[in-house]
Image: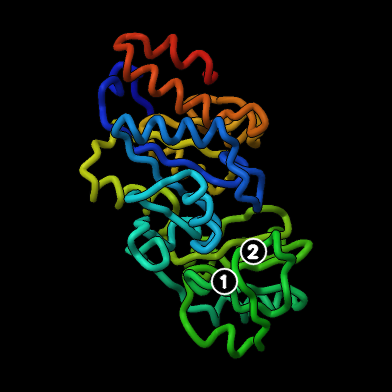
Amino acid sequence: MNTTAENLTAARLLIALDIDGTLVPDGTTDVPDVTRQAVADVVAAGHVVVLATGRSLVGAVPVAEALGLNGSYVVASNGAVTARLDRTWPCGYRVESCQTLDVAPVLHLARRLCPAVRVAVEEVGWGYHVSELFDPGEVNGRQIVVPDDDLTAEPAPRVILSAPNATAVLLEPVRSLGVTVNPASPSWLDVTPVGLSKASALDAIRQRLAVAPEHTVFVGDGINDLEAMAWAARSFAMGHAPMLVQDTADHVTGTLAEHGAATVLRNLLAEQTRPGAGAQAMAGAGS
């Protein structure tokens, strides 16, 4: 979706931001000061900032805390989990939506086609039950190794399948089960319930907050961001994103090292404060 800069002027915006590769290096919570300040400035101006990530909730919340977000929302697990942030609640958030899938068909098919596949089944707010331990930087939260029967015992919002050739061997067969499959890399598949994406979860939040569709913005860098880029009235790809992502977005901003997300936020504020200057303001974010 696309719209003009002038239509965004003086509007309350819903600005959705990917985390890994957009706000922080993959797997970290190291938010640069310039990005933290840019987020604080757009929130102070009355806009809504929502994090939308493939991370589990337990991995996303520390980034929200580092950004100082409170009262807003986090979309986690590629749209399967939505939580509202509130520091007055014991864990700092409340799960608003959690959609789940039957793990058994996914695991049984994956084992048949790729016997050595590593499997992680998400438990919201805690971590993962896993077939074998993953490196700490690969998944967020705690891990407990359990047999396959225990991995399939309960529905879950997300199943991770990891093997050297996971995408080539498993992507289409697992999709044929009627679930959503996002290939994060040639060796990594994220499996979530059917019909889910960051976009579907973000639109539910947009409707809840009564934000007009033409006042939505998305910034990201990954293949799992394509639906959200199509959903947003204005979308921005990070400068290091794959060409497919850059070609899908309305604009291309700087890389992570260049603080491209902060550039977008600053320029959106410039549009708000200088009516009619949208095209000039966006020049710094790429086009």
User: Where 76 falls versus 170 (above or below)?
Assistant: above
Name the residue carrying label 2. Answer: 139
| Labelled pair 1, 2 in contact (Cβ < 8 Å) | yes
Color theme of the render:
rainbow
Q: CA distance from mark 1 to mark 2?
A: 8 Å
Q: Is 44 displayed left or right of 121 in the figure?
A: left
Q: Position of residue 183 (x, y in %)?
A: 62, 55
Q: Quadrant of the N terminus?
A: top left
Name the residue rendered at 54%, 19% in the picture: 286
Residue 275, above or below 168: above
Q: Position of residue 233 (x, y in %)?
A: 36, 32
The answer to which quarter of the image holds residue 133 is bottom right
Residue 55 at what x, y percent from top left?
Answer: 55, 57
What's under tag 2, amino acid-wise? Val
State the SS at label 1. strand
Give percent across and percent down for residue 125. Answer: 48, 69
Task: Residue type at mark 1: give it.
Answer: Gly
Residue pictured at 52% horizontal, 55% vertical: 62
Q: Is residue 172 above or below residue 8?
A: below
Q: Which residue is mark 1?
A: 127
Q: Give the residue at x 34% y 49%.
A: 72
Q: Earlier in the sequence, mark 1 or mark 2?
A: 1
